[in-house]
Amino acid sequence: MYLDTRYRVHLEWMFENQPSLVLKLLRKNKLKDHLDDKEKRALKLVMQLRDNRGMTEDEAFEVACQTILAPPDGPAMSDHPPKPLDWRQREAVYKRLEEMGDEEEMHEKEDFQKRHGLI
């Protein structure tokens, strides 16, 4: 699974601001769904800003980052920030997401082959 910029921006923000949520979603196999949802919301906002307000794609992406993907006023900026995930934990999360993406791609390929009578 290729984690694009929007996924990575939000995931890195979560590592610093919502570390316990990252681990909880990962245990429940819901982290990818969460990242998918955030990406969809960010893309929707980018399209709205581009189409309705005439912003460039880059300008709209910056707004989406600030409001959806990586708000600057997250818990990591508070007086009592959460303990962020260390590099080993982060590496394990990325590895698991890659594995989940590979599994998803394999299932999509099998479904395509079945629909088209290739297997």
Image (cartoon, rainbow, N blue to C red):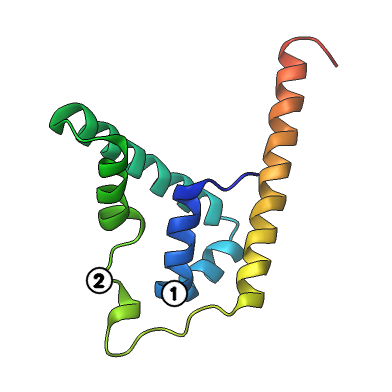
Q: Position of residue 113 (x, y in %)?
A: 77, 18
Q: Among all residues in the image, which is located at the extreme top? A: 117
Q: Callout 2: few (<14), some (14-19), or many (20+) C-alpha neighbours within 10 Å?
A: few
Which residue is at 71% across, 23% downward?
111
Q: Which residue is mark 1?
A: 16
Q: Position of residue 7 (x, y in %)?
A: 49, 51
Q: Among all residues in the image, which is located at the extreme left? A: 53
User: Which quadrant would residue 86 be assigned to in this image?
Assistant: bottom right
Q: Callout 1: few (<14), some (14-19), or many (20+) C-alpha neighbours within 10 Å?
A: many
Check disc 1 and give the amino acid type: Glu
Check disc 2 and give the amino acid type: Asp
Q: Which mark is residue 59?
A: none
Q: Which residue is mark 2?
A: 73
Q: Position of residue 83 (x, y in %)?
A: 46, 85
Label 2: which secondary element: loop
Gap between marks 1 and 2, in whole Å? 12 Å
**Residues at marks 1 and 2 touching, judged by CB atoms closer than 8 Å:** no
